[in-house]
Image: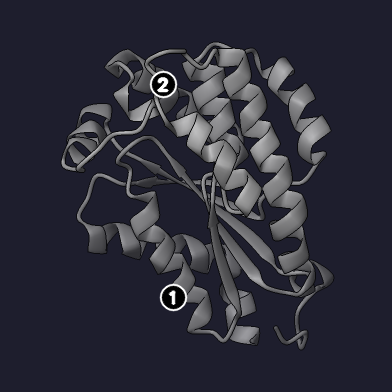
Amino acid sequence: MSSSGLDNKVQRGLFITLEGGEGSGKTTQIATVKEYFQAAGYDVVCTREPGGTKIAERIRSILLTKEHEEDLCSISELLLMYASRAQLVNTLIKPMLEQGKIVISDRFDLSTVAYQGAGRGFDLETISKLREIAIGNFKPDLTLLLDVDVKLGMERVLRRSARDRFEQEAEEFFTRIRQGFRDYAAKHTDEVYLIDGSSDEASVANAVRAALDKKFAHLVKAK
């Protein structure tokens, strides 16, 4: 990444996350974000949560696989989420940012606020304490929150061949999650861009590019 015309923050790279409930289209729109920065000549690394490294992917398997003999309790779920996140941040994301790369993640800490906070009922103070231990004050430069109606999202999920442990939860769980996402976005408009994910893929992609332009157009032009 060229440092010409760029400030110190950008020289270290940029960390961008896509968030949303089940079936919101995050994975699809990661390609839009990737193409946006690659077209301007940036090196881009894509990852996901939970997972993203060899060890974190093992944790992901525990989190997403439903064991019929033993339920994963909500406390273990929360702790495993932060164990996976700490591993990803410290062994992949931070090193890539130091090399000046753009890092894009399918989910990050906001998912814990929504899923384990609003969804499972953990208070935000508890989550904040674990966040401090796991990743300190590290956070994305921008979060794109794809918002879809719960019923529409689950209709999309049901088209898949298999559903993971979270996707098998009741509709009320996802309703709480959606509200958790929206509540956070309303209070943090400087860091989270809310995007209607219910439209067709091309329309959502246009909205994603518009959000990126609003935040980063001056950097892309300076590249």
Left or right: 54 as drawn, with respect to 118: right
Q: Which residue is mark 1?
A: 35
In the image, residue 39 sits, relative to residue 31, either above or below, namely below
The residue shown at (65%, 85%) is: 222
1 or 2: mark nearer the eye: 2
The residue shown at (76%, 88%) is: 4
The residue shown at (41%, 18%) is: 176
Q: Type of residue at label 2?
A: Glu
Question: Is residue 167 in view?
Answer: yes
In the image, residue 53 sits, relative to residue 124, either above or below, namely below
Residue 69 image offset from top left, x and y in percent = 41, 13
Task: Give the farthest residue toward the front.
Answer: 69
Residue 214 image offset from top left, x and y in percent = 53, 64
- Secondary structure of the residue carrying numbered label 2: loop
Q: Earlier in the sequence, mark 1 or mark 2?
A: 1
Mark 1 neighbour density, 10 Å: few (under 14) some (14–19) many (20 or more): some
Q: Type of residue at label 1?
A: Glu
Q: Which numbered dot is residue 67?
A: 2
Left or right: 37 as drawn, with respect to 14: left
